[in-house]
């Protein structure tokens, strides 16, 4: 049962799609005092949720600030990342879920100040709070997902392996990547284009010196089974003669400053304006521009810098330069030096910027900071809604860096600018259940790590984790070690992992569709299925995937195995290559599992089996007629599949039963 409580005058975020009659009684379970919501916590209570946030599956013990932020430092002391997903499930004397539908800054102090209390503090008390009673965590998630609407489904080719790097600067770079993968025999479905393909970082342009014939290149790649996926950024470069800039100014589609002039920030191109994505007219206008690239044969996009990221504003930059001049006395001491570095570091993403521009909504000027967390959501919505008009019969790949609950209906997300750190495998995995809870199903991390230099063993272990996530993309930062799989001496072992991924796609795609249509989670903490098993509730480095699998990745350097907890008898599956499968039945309990660097290990639940097809070079070549079952005998599996591209999934959806 869902109860709704309204405080003040909430902004309509459009996060929900189902009407709930407001309750005028006091909010259940939580104490509302002043501008805070407080819950007393017992020592063994568990708090799940908050989507894309740091730390473990159980959110006890830290202070989280949901304020969408361009933050490449995903450290344990981080408070904010790119998305704000204000949904929690509390396992206490009362099991309940709660969604704080609030688009501004909101702090979740979950036992940080006082371990026995959870304190939720929105910047203002203009919000809707939805409280969900249910029989289990899975029941609460299902109710919440029905409240917020069905999740986005990408084309099936998006489940293939993708190669990306900030630094593919021209057509020859792209051709080289495709050729090297082909020569190595490693399956590949997409190559991503970062900001280098643009003309001076201008949205919806192509640098013709570097990419002389983008349409020809896209056609050439598609003939090889490879899709090009370019980046689109939120800021529009201020440049006379640039049609997107001039049209946006002329028609009033950009956010304004207090004086009613177009607000000026700075990102990759230097000075930019920001489209007012919270207005339908600006959304439709910006979205229509994607046709510039779809007309060249592009059928996938990733939206970036849409928190929105702001490197500096003119006034704060000028102020910083002047103060640095004052500090530089010819013999700068430690106090002056740190003052200078703090000042420079404080320019990027300074919260003061977001108080200085406004959205025009229904004729009313709304300060951006009051609705900040909705910006990326509505940029993705802009693209999705427009492409449904431009390409009405087929699905387009969309995913975004910034998001709010509701954006899950329009696209997926990637988990941002992580680093080539072992701990970031675990962090990425621990975010999956909370993101699924919030409706985000098409999710994945930058495999191998975006920042820093990866290592061969880290890449292998990361592949063994990422092969189970819907979005499977290897992405790295300009200036770091090249981490295309063919760059490593263990390329054959890496090829084996990608081959296994393609064998698993029928199962992964099927479970994705089931979870989407059923408003359920594809990835779950094992305690969700075993709520009375204290050992299961304490596990935060294993996940159930669908109804058949459990994954337990290796995320420590030089580890040749790991401990796992099996809450039931399971079948251990070892794969060194696509065609080498060894299985072993293991009893319920705690086990140490040996896992060599070159093998994949996962578990099939008792009495279950999964479909696996032959490996292929591209998803378009997968042959579902080659499906065989792996798992327990006398088991059944119902496979969901469609044509992988039609916008109306129901027209081609099939449910096929397989027996083992």
Image: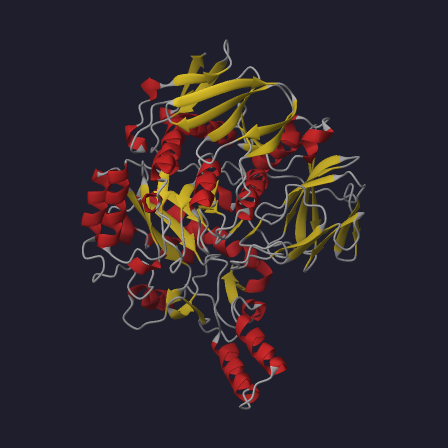
Residue 263, above or below 573: below
Coordinates of residue 13 in the picture (x, y in percent): 56, 51
Residue at left offset 43%, top offset 55% = 304
**Quadrant the N terminus occupies:** top right
Which residue is at the far bottom?
A: 329
Q: Please state which of residues 4 and 38 is positioned toward the viewer in this rendering.
A: 38
The answer to whether residue 118 is seen in the rendering is yes
Q: Tell me how the rendering is colored.
A: secondary structure
Q: Is residue 428 left or right of residue 140?
A: left
Q: Is residue 298 left or right of residue 598?
A: left
Coordinates of residue 243 in the picture (x, y in percent): 29, 65
The answer to whether residue 131 is seen in the rendering is no
Q: Is residue 543 left or right of residue 189?
A: right
Residue 63, above or below 47: below
Q: Please state which of residues 641 and 245 is positioned toward the viewer in this rendering.
A: 641
Q: Please state which of residues 185 and 36 is positioned toward the viewer in this rendering.
A: 185
Residue at left offset 43%, top offset 16% = 629
Coordinates of residue 255 in the picture (x, y in percent): 47, 66
Q: How many marks?
A: 0
**Quadrant the C terminus occupies:** top left
Residue 626, above or below 10: above
Q: Is residue 86 left or right of residue 597?
A: right
Q: Please state which of residues 605 and 79 is positioned toward the viewer in this rendering.
A: 605
Residue 411, above or below 206: above
Coordinates of residue 466 in the picture (x, y in percent): 46, 39
């Amino acid at each position: 049962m869902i109860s709704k409580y309204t405080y003040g005058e909430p902004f309509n975020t459009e996060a929900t799609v189902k009407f709930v009659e407001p309750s005028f009684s006091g909010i259940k379970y939580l104490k509302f005092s002043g501008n805070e919501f407080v819950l007393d916590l017992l020592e063994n209570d568990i708090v799940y949720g908050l989507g894309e946030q740091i730390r473990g599956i159980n959110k006890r013990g830290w202070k989280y600030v949901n304020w969408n932020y361009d933050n490449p430092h995903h450290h344990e002391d981080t408070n904010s990342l790119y998305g704000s997903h204000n949904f929690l499930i509390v396992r206490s004397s009362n099991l309940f879920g709660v969604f704080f539908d609030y688009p501004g800054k909101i702090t979740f102090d979950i036992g940080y100040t006082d371990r026995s209390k959870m304190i939720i503090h929105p910047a203002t008390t203009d919000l809707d709070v939805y409280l969900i009673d249910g029989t289990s965590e899975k029941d609460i998630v299902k109710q919440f997902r029905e409240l917020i609407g069905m999740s986005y489904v990408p084309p099936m080719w998006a489940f293939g392996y993708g190669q990306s790097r900030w630094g593919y600067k021209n057509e020859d770079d792209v051709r080289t990547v495709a050729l090297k993968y082909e020569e190595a025999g490693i399956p590949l479905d997409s190559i991503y284009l970062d900001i280098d393909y643009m003309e001076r970082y201008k949205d919806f342009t192509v640098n013709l010196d570097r990419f002389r014939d983008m349409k020809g290149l896209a056609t050439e790649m598609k003939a090889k089974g490879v899709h090009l996926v370019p980046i689109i950024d939120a800021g529009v470069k201020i440049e006379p003669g640039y049609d997107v800039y001039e049209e946006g100014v002329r028609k009033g589609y950009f956010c304004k400053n207090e004086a009613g002039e177009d607000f000026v920030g700075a990102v990759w191109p230097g000075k930019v304006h920001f489209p007012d994505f919270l207005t339908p007219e600006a959304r439709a206008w910006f979205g229509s521009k994607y046709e510039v690239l779809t007309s060249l044969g592009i059928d996938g996009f990733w939206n970036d810098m849409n928190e929105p990221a702001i490197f500096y504003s003119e006034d704060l930059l000028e102020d910083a330069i002047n103060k640095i001049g004052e500090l530089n006395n010819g013999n700068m001491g430690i106090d002056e030096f740190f003052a200078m570095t703090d000042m420079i570091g404080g320019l990027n993403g300074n919260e003061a910027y977001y108080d200085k521009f406004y959205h025009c909504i229904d004729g009313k000027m709304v300060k951006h900071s009051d609705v900040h967390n909705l910006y990326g959501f509505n940029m993705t919505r802009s693209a999705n809604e427009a492409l449904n008009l431009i390409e009405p019969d087929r699905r387009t790949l969309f995913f975004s860096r910034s998001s709010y609950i509701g954006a899950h209906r329009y696209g997926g997300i990637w988990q941002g600018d992580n680093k080539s750190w072992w701990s970031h495998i675990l962090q990425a995995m621990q975010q999956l259940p909370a993101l699924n809870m919030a409706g985000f199903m098409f999710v994945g991390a930058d495999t191998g790590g975006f920042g820093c230099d990866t290592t061969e063993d880290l890449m292998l272990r990361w592949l063994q984790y990422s092969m189970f996530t819907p979005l499977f993309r290897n992405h790295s930062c300009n200036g770091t070690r090249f981490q295309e799989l063919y760059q490593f001496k263990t390329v054959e072992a890496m090829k084996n992992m990608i081959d296994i991924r393609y064998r698993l796609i029928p199962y992964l795609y099927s479970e994705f569709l089931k979870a989407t249509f059923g408003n359920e989670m594809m990835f779950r903490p094992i305690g969700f299925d075993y709520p009375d098993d204290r050992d299961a509730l304490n596990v935060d480095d294993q996940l159930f995937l669908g109804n058949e699998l459990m994954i337990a990745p290796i995320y420590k350097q030089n580890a040749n195995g790991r401990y796992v907890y099996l809450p039931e008898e399971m079948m251990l599956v070892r794969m060194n290559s696509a065609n080498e499968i060894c299985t072993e039945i293991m009893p319920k309990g705690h086990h140490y599992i040996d896992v060599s660097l070159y093998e994949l290990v996962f578990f099939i639940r008792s009495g279950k089996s999964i479909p696996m097809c032959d490996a292929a070079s591209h998803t378009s070549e997968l042959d579902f007629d080659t499906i065989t079952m792996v798992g327990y005998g006398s088991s059944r599996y119902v496979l969901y599949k469609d044509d992988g591209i039609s916008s109306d999934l129901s027209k081609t959806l099939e449910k096929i039963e397989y027996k083992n």
